[in-house]
Image (cartoon, grey):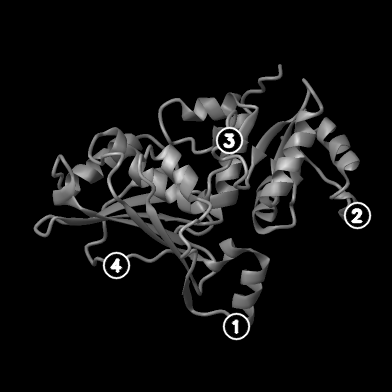
Amino acid sequence: MPAKIFIDGDSGTTGLGIRARLEARPDIELLSLPLSQRKDAAAKQAVMERADIVVLCLPDDAARESAAIAASIGERSPRILDASTAHRVAEGWIYGFPELSSGQAEAIASARLVANPGCYATGAIALLRPLVDKGFLPAAFPLTIHAVSGYSGGGKAMIADYELGVAPSFEAYALGLEHKHVPEIERYARLARRPVFAPAVGNFAQGMLVCVPLFLDDLPLKPRGADLEAALAAHYAGCQFVKAVPAESSGKIEPQSLNGRNDLELRVFANDARGHAILVAKLDNLGKGASGAALQNLNLMLRHDPRN
């Protein structure tokens, strides 16, 4: 019998991406609500009662409201995969980055509540967590994270501005230093000190680079670039979607070559003579950074239903 999936908020970029990835699958039946009923709590509860998994692609407050409706159903309430920021550091929710650590994929597979990661956070955590775990990077080390994303991650208004040609070619933003992805970066990279996060958006639709510069001589173990690359490679050995790859000898990297895929590539650009390195994560902000990651998590969740 096909699994019944309800995407709550399937008119946005992430929801549309998830629906497109599921529509042709014979093992899944997609449930939906008429547009006129999408904010009707009773109608939403009725469709949730039929669903095996509900995917939330909503603003944070609306996601919390929908999660509460699902919880009110009781023992047979559907499992939840939340693509918003609302529950990424909330108690009782499993963080949906399967490659985070040993056992994380199984935790997602058996969870009732899963929070899909943020796009920037996916790149930053993928770079930092292995180095913290291996002792190369002290948890309280001062860090800066620089990133650039395609404009498709900015919502309908930003997408429209870029497609109309009225947006700037490049724009730094969140300079109030309160970006919503920072709490999950802190928690799941196991940082004891809040990093300075400086995101930007460029005039291209999809693709993302997340960069972390390091003074290698300031790290207690005085690692070389090859040591950091080896630590990343060991952590992600055997992973299908996340890989450490050699840095380009040109010293250049562009953000779009992984578009349309669920892959995440990690590189270490190092100048050992100078004691400098830049860690770089490349991903599709709509792939491993959003809909692709959601599909990966859904596939894990469909393997096991804790309600049975």
The correct choice, above or below, for 21 with respect to 251 in the image is above
Q: CA distance from mark 2 to mark 3?
A: 31 Å
- Amino acid carrying label 2: it is Ser
Residue type beneath disc 4: Lys
> Is 92 on the left or on the right of 209, as rendered?
right
Front label number (3 vs 1): 3
Looking at this view, name the residue that lies furthest to the front: 176
- Label 4 and label 2: CA atoms lie apart by 49 Å
Q: Secondary structure at mark 2?
A: helix
Q: In the rendered image, which residue does mark 2 sit on?
A: 36
Counting from the top left corner in percent of width and height, residue 91 is at: 58, 30
Q: Is residue 277 above or below residue 1?
A: below
Sooner in the amino-acid sequence: mark 4 or mark 3: 3
- Camera-nearest label, 2 or 3: 3
Nearest to viewer (mark 4 / mark 1) = 1
Q: Which residue is mark 1?
A: 166
| Proximity of marks 4 and 3: CB atoms separated by less than 8 Å | no
- Please state which of the two labelled residues, at mark 4 or mark 2, is closer to the viewer: 2
Q: Nearer the viewer, residue 303 or 119?
A: 119
Q: Residue at x 61, y 39 (%)?
A: 87
Residue placed most toward the observer, 173 or 153: 173
User: Residue at image x 41%, y 27%?
Assistant: 102
Query: Which residue is the site of mark 3?
Result: 90
Going from the N terminus, do you reach mark 2 or mark 1 first?
2
Marks 4 and 3, how far apart in space? 38 Å
Question: Label for residue 303?
Answer: none
